[in-house]
Image (tube, rainbow, N blue to C red):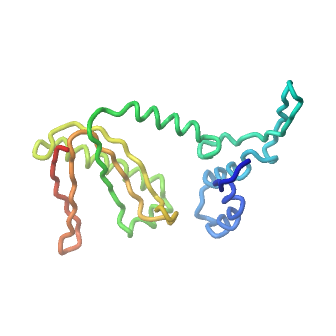
Amino acid sequence: MRTSLEVADVFRAAGSAYRATHAGHLSLHQLKVMSAIEHCRTAALGGHVEACTECGHWRIAYNSCRNRHCPKCQGAAARNWLAAREADLLPVGYFHVVFTLPAEIAAIAFHNKALLYDLLFKTASETTLTIAADPRHLGARIGITAVLHTVRRQNIWHNSRRRFAECGPRLGLMFRRRACGVASADVRVSFA
């Protein structure tokens, strides 16, 4: 018997109100994902009867949505993916770098996700690789794993951040604000 709250429970309880409040701001893809998770392993997707040939006990098992975003369907796949990524890690230090969109651009990104996030990914990657390759800083070719974060822990949409895990010697980026308000970056290298 299930005792914990699931994403599907939240979607079923508050999904329609959320969709009404954010009408016009959710893509068709997002709406389909919400619907799939809401209907996952319910009568809405049909089901089948599982029966024990020994004792005759039977139960109804509802079909899953198989959506890649569904935590119920993809929990095992996510764990397997993570284990495979951990197996790929090199025996070196990894470091966290964050690129944040200015607040003025966040609203534009909310309505033009594909365009702005693609630009953020390309720009952040090029910046990190260029600084790392510069002999004055690190003079190395580094590896990057990048993740897009668009929600805070409190589940509030915020300025999008592009997070990198750098591999190898630490490439520290220290940003300072000039008097005119423009951000400048100083780079330092340390070996951890």
Q: Quadrant of residue 90?
A: top left
Q: Where residue 26 sits: x, y (%)?
A: 60, 60
Q: Where residue 28 sits: x, y (%)?
A: 63, 54
Against 49, residue 175 (above or below) is: below
Foreground residue among 157 and 182: 157
Q: Residue furthest top?
A: 54
> In this rendering, would 105 be left or right of 168?
right
Q: Residue furthest right?
A: 56
> In this rendering, would 134 be left or right of 27?
left
Identify the residue shown where x is 46% and y is 34%.
83
Foreground residue among 149 and 85: 85
Against 172, residue 179 (above or below) is: below
Q: Residue furthest front?
A: 55
Q: Quadrant of residue 168?
A: top left
Q: Where residue 64 sits: x, y (%)?
A: 72, 41
Identify the residue shown where x is 20% and y is 65%.
176
Q: Where residue 154 sits: x, y (%)?
A: 50, 65
Identify the residue shown where x is 84% and y is 28%.
52
Figure quadrant of the C terminus: top left
Foreground residue among 184 and 10: 10
> In this rendering, would 103 be left or right of 92?
right
Identify the residue shown where x is 86% and y is 25%.
53
Q: Residue furthest bottom?
A: 179
